[in-house]
Amino acid sequence: MKSFSQRTKEMLARLEIGDDCCCEAEMMGILMFAGKFKGLEIRVSLESLDAIERLAALVKRCLDVDVQIKSLRSSYFCVLSDKKVLHKILEYEKLKSGFSQKLIKNECCSAAFLRGSFLGGGTMTDPNKNYNMEFTVYSPQIHNEFKKLLENMGLGFRSIEKRNGFVLYTKNSDIICDALAHMGAFSAQMEILNVKIEKEVRSDITRTSNGETANMDKVMEASSRHIRAIDDIEKIMGIDNLPDDLKEVAHLRRDHKDLSLEQLGKKLVPPLSKSGVNHRLRRILEIAENL
């Protein structure tokens, strides 16, 4: 069964390719995050056939270079050795001011580059288990530029350095949804939002249930104290010897052990407020203590 991350990537890979500027931004996003130099060629390995076919389509559209795709176990790869591809990558690597200033021409290009970065080096956890989106990158320059790009898009990803590179990540579901919206992964975004709603509803039900249970425990604890006091009074002096207002409450409390003070008050004739019932029961407790 395909993971949530794999399904999202396959959906993104089937989107219509945008304008020429976006086409190049998305292509470079994949190559910068998934491409690895080996001599005078670049090897790109992706887990999704749809994703690597999209890369091939992007390279053909931008550079008019045909890409041959091969399979290896559970992944797919291609080897890019055409001078046009190598020149394009080196062109961005040599920029001292950072690749984003030349690559990101319009706001749409930011979204396209983010989409390519996710297809090349991103992953996401199933929202039913946890919220987590991350990008793995091996170049310090690409890491720094990409982090700035995310910040400019209002996406506050955190960064940690690992032995072989960097990981930019977020566990914030709102940021993940915003990132998916930028990429064009609206169905994945809606799936996360639906999961969030379900979790919030379950949480509210649990809180309500816990609150009701706690309130019932308090009612039963107070009721037990009242019953013990009333039983003591019955043994020593008799309930009927209490003042009429206390006698009425005492009989009612013995007959309805599970009712709250408010509910007891409604059964009195005339009805009595919660504080009024509490006052009478406190007097009964005091009488029992002084016997």
Image (cartoon, helix red, strand yellow):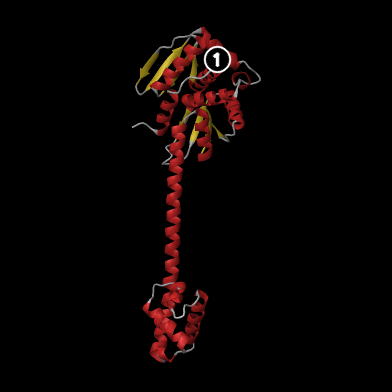
| Residue farthest toward the front in the current orientation of the protein | 270
User: Picture coordinates of residue 14 (x, y %)?
Assistant: 42, 23
Residue 204 versus residue 100 in the image, above or below: below
One can see residue 162 in this view = no
Instruction: Please state which of residues 93 and 38 is positioned toward the viewer in this rendering.
Output: 93
- Is 23 placed left or right of 8 in the picture? right
Residue 203 versus residue 56 in the image, above or below: below
One can see residue 146 in this view = yes
Who's the residue at 44% across and 50% down the image? 201
User: Picture coordinates of residue 256 (x, y %)?
Assistant: 38, 76
Q: How many marks?
A: 1
| Residue farthest toward the right in the current orientation of the protein | 97
Who's the residue at 45% across and 39% down the image? 192
Query: In what element is the residue under mark 1?
Result: helix
Who's the residue at 50% across and 40% down the image? 173
Image quarter for residue 266?
bottom left
Image quarter for residue 210?
bottom left
Who's the residue at 43% across and 86% down the image? 247
Residue 210 versus residue 141 in the image, above or below: below
Q: Which residue is mark 1?
A: 89
Q: Amino acid at mark 1?
A: Ile
User: Picture coordinates of residue 237 (x, y %)?
Assistant: 41, 92
- Is 100 placed left or right of 188 in the picture? right
Q: How many other residues sit within 10 Å of disc 1, few (<14), some (14-19) or many (≥20)? A: some
Q: Quadrant of the N terminus?
A: top left
